Every structure is written in C-alpha cells, then in structure tokens.
Amino acid sequence: MSSQPRQQGGEQISLDTLTPQQLSAVKKQLDEEVEHLSTSYAQLAAAQNKFKECLRVVTAGETYFDEKKPIMVPLTNSLYVKGRLSDPSRVIVDVGTGFYVEKDTKDAATFYQEKVKELQGNIQGLEAIVQGKTQNLRLVEEVLRQKVLAQGQGQQQQAAA
C-alpha cells in the first residue's frame, strides 16, 4: 500500500511528511469530496431511472394508449389533470432546459435510449472516481491513525523518563 494518494493534478503527496493536523485537513477535504461525488452519483442514477421510465412508457405507449381512453397529464410534479391523446403515435419529449419537441414514438424511444446510455457512461466514470477518492481517504485515515498512535507512544515514553 503506497502512502502517496494521487491529487487531481496528477501530483503525489507523501503522507509520511505531513503532520497529523495536515492529515486531518486532507481527510476532511477527501470526506467532503466523496460526499459531493456520492450525491452526484445518486442524482445521475435518479435521472437515468427517470429516462428508463420514459423509455418504458414510450415503447409501451402506442399499444397501451388509446385516443378514446383518458390519461393523467402532469402539470407539475404533484398536479395532474385528465386528458386525451390526439395521436398515440406522437409524443412530446422534454429535451432539457424547458424545451419540448414533438416526436414519433420510435424517435422518442431512440432519444431516451441514448440518454440512458450516456448517463450509464457518466455513472461508471463517476463510480471509478468515487472508488479512487475512497481508497485515498482510507489511506489517509490509516496514516493518520499510525501517526497519532506513534505520537501517543512518544509522549508516554517522555512521561516515563
């Protein structure tokens, strides 16, 4: 196990040369980074699930929806109204930042499949970063623990002398 975690710029820091206070500061920074990255990971996973659900609805929609059958149309996250589809083979797709585009169900399914695939790549990349940061955090914690124990033993030896 190396005591030199990689920084974002690619430089290495020898943990053996840092004081316990400096190690605590590095640990705190890594804790914050891991927490932030874990939150981002959860948000990406939630977005991916949303797109998967949209894909499921679009692919099942043409056979499931009927022009005569009423549906619930979302106006907000918690407000829905009854409506009817004028053409079950055409849907409105949220393409981001408040823009909507009308697409046929095949194009909408392709759009959502690409979004799911793109997010999967982002999730995998972020997962690798989180694992690296977590490994660095464990290494810093171990070196800090060793230094605190060594410092405590040195104080006991001074007190005994």
Image (cartoon, rainbow, N blue to C red):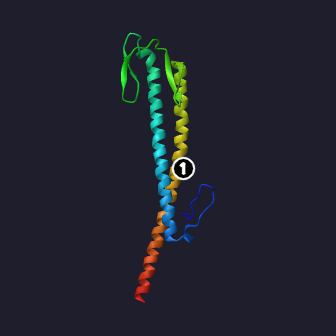
For residue 139, say whether it is visible: no
Residue at (52, 54) in percent of width and height: 133
Query: Residue at position x 55%, y 70% from top?
Result: 18
Q: Residue furthest bottom?
A: 161
List x then y, in percent, for residue 125. Answer: 55, 44
Instruction: Point out residue 146 in the picture as x, y percentages from the top left corner.
Output: 47, 71
Q: Which is nearer the eye, 84 or 138?
A: 84
> Residue 52 location in percent, x, y?
46, 30
Q: Measured along the vertical axis of the image, is residue 122 above or below residue 99? A: below
Query: What amino acid is at disc 1?
Result: Ile
Is residue 36 depicted above or below 63 in this figure? below
Q: Quadrant of the N terminus?
A: bottom right
Residue bearing mark 1: 129
144 relative to 110, above or below: below
Q: Where is 69 relative to 6, above or below?
A: above
What residue is at 44 percent from the left and 37 percent from the top?
A: 46
Q: For residue 60, which quarter of the picture?
A: top left
